Amino acid sequence: MKICIAPNLFIYDWYSVLEKYKSIVKPNMTVLEIGASNTSNTKQLAGHCKTLIGVELFSKRTPKNFSNIKYLTGDWQKLSSIIKTKSIDIAVSTHVIEHVPNDILALNELYSVLKPGGVAIINTPNRKRLTRTIIELFTEERKFPYWEHEREYTKTDLQNLIHKSKFKQYKIKPVVFGLHGGPVYAYLESVPTFLRSLSNFWEIHLTK
């Protein structure tokens, strides 16, 4: 078990997604990234596939096309209006689904654009992460919508969401266990089994 002290545990959150992605991507694949305003992350994904389509909700945050990356402005909830159905091999979305008003519709739209056997990798904050759980021992439970988040999820919330969607094959992985505050983050990369409900993030793998 590795204990880390780092300036930002969100770095490992992204690395976990990237590790899963690299284990399944092939050079001839078409990849979709939903929420593609971070060009550094997008370029890392694009380096392993034939074509990457980046979708960003806001036109002012949509980057210009680059190399094998094509950017589109659009809404995840209306994905099939801008992406051809059954055309995507792998979809990646980090810290977006908690912002989407209709998350079931978003998953079903994602299902429609994936090829049979296609995989989606999604991550999102754990509503009952350790820091939030400690805070709520002394305050009331956070109510949603909150700030930009329509909601956050426990593992049970995610299971219920997926069961209502068209996806039947899935895995929910806990990512990072730790505390953060101020300039330093201390965390375990591998989440102990008995602490999984308190992990900082969930990483969801969906297969069509």
Image: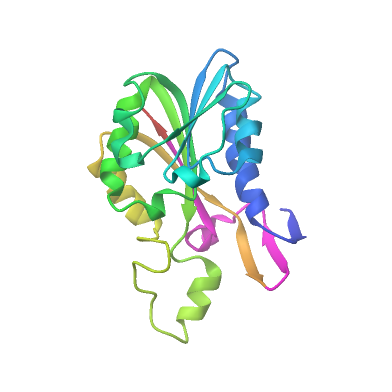
Left or right for 79, reference 205? left
Q: Nearer the viewer, residue 70 or 173?
A: 70
Residue 187: image location, x then y, percent: 68, 61
Please, which residue is most extreme toward the front here?
Answer: 60
Above or below, 138 relative to 24: below
| Picture mark count | 0
Q: Is residue 144 magenta?
A: no
In what quadrant of the picture does the C terminus appear?
top left
Above or below, 106 relative to 69: below
Above or below, 123 relative to 117: below
Identify which residue is drawn at 66% across, 57% down: 9
The image quadrant that residue 78 belongs to is top left
Q: Nearer the viewer, residue 195 or 127?
A: 127
Q: Is residue 198 magenta?
A: yes
Please, which residue is most extreme toward the left here?
Answer: 164
Please, which residue is most extreme toward the top here?
Answer: 28
Identify which residue is drawn at 39% across, 54% down: 99
Residue 173: image location, x then y, percent: 50, 46
Residue 30: image location, x then y, percent: 49, 19
Q: Write the start and end of the magenta stretch as one range.
A: 182-205
Left or right for 46, reference 148? right
Left or right for 44, reference 155? right
Kindly tell me whether residue 168 is visible in this rendering.
no
The image quadrant that residue 105 belongs to is top left
Colour pattern:
rainbow
Identify which residue is drawn at 51% across, 79% down: 135
Residue 98: image location, x then y, percent: 40, 54
Identify which residue is drawn at 66% across, 32% down: 44
Kindly tell me whether residue 155 is visible in this rendering.
yes
